[in-house]
Image (tube, grey):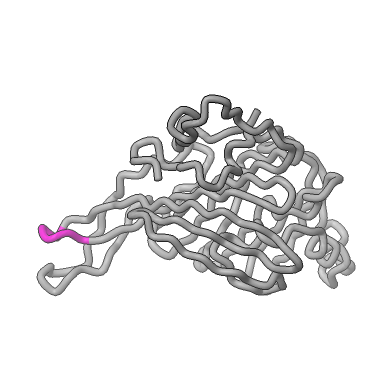
Amino acid sequence: MESLPPEWRMESDEDYSFYADYAPPPPVKGLVVHGYVADDSIVGEDGTVTVTSPEACPAPVTFRPARSIPPAFPERTTGEYWFYRSGDQALYLSRKWEYAVDGACQGVTREVSRIVRIVWFNGTATFIGERDGGATDLSTEKIKDNETYPIPSWLVKIDDADLRENQQSRLVRQSPSRMTRGRDEGTGVMRTCVDLSEAFIFATECYYSGTGPWRGYLLSADAQDDAGGNYSEAGTVSFDPAARIDGRLFEWDRAIARSDGDAR
């Protein structure tokens, strides 16, 4: 049964309910994803970070941040996420790294965690988010192409429309070898990858091409220009389209927190 990873913890059954006859909900079937995002906005190829300094410091500060990035992630990872969805409800957990300069003109790193619960209804998605410090954000957005959401867009709109569009694209029609099918080495699921590179830009997108409601999920996407700049990447390190998920994750009033922080 899939539950929280070691980096997170949930409120115990004893603390969650004072009723003697309380019984946790049974497992539910759904989708479980663990992934990352990366880009060259802050972290350089050598793993260092350069941050604009306050006026009191003589120059921008470059330092190598202390980050606990999993081995499977690229060096320029900026965030990590976990996603659990069953039917029309989901739980999204994430952490990202922020960088600043302290009063001694030294670089400092801070991890920022987020918890977002999502409900889909009648063409919309409602997001209830918690940030470090306990602040809560609430928003409802229409589900449509090129929309901006509080969580990555490929987690909100999951269908095979982009997969089918890329399969029938001009690039693939002109060069069928741009499209490949096979089993993803990292996740073990079937995928279809499309090389979308054009003049001066290298880009690839890979989609889950198995059956079921999650067909077309964007497993990975990467792009950069021919000089190595404008790099961006999103990847999936684990993907279970038929997971048995701990039903307690969808008890919305049950507190969840990072393992090294207070439950909230």
Direction front: furthest residue: 20
Query: Is residue 200 visible to us here?
Result: no
Question: What quarter of the picture does the N terminus occupy?
Answer: top right
Quadrant location, the C terminus: top left
Position in image of residue 199 (x %, y %): 67, 74
In magenta stretch: residue 37: no
Q: Quadrant of residue 261?
A: top left
Q: State the residue at coordinates (87%, 69%).
A: 174
The residue positioned 30% from the left and 58% from the top of the image is 99
- Residue 246: x and y in percent read 62, 33
Left or right of 116? Residue 143 is: right
Total numbered badges shown on the rendered structure: 0
**From the viewer's perspective, is 134 left or right of 244?**
left
Give x and y (percent) for residue 86: 71, 45
Q: Residue at x 51, y 46 (%)?
A: 253
**Residue at the spot x=48%, y=51% of the render?**
115
Residue in the foreground of this view, choosing between 19 and 99: 19
State whether residue 118 appears in this view.
yes
What kind of secondary structure does the magenta stretch mostly adopt? loop
The picture quadrant where one finds residue 61 is bottom left
* Chain part drawn in magenta: 101-105
Q: Quadrant of residue 186?
A: top right
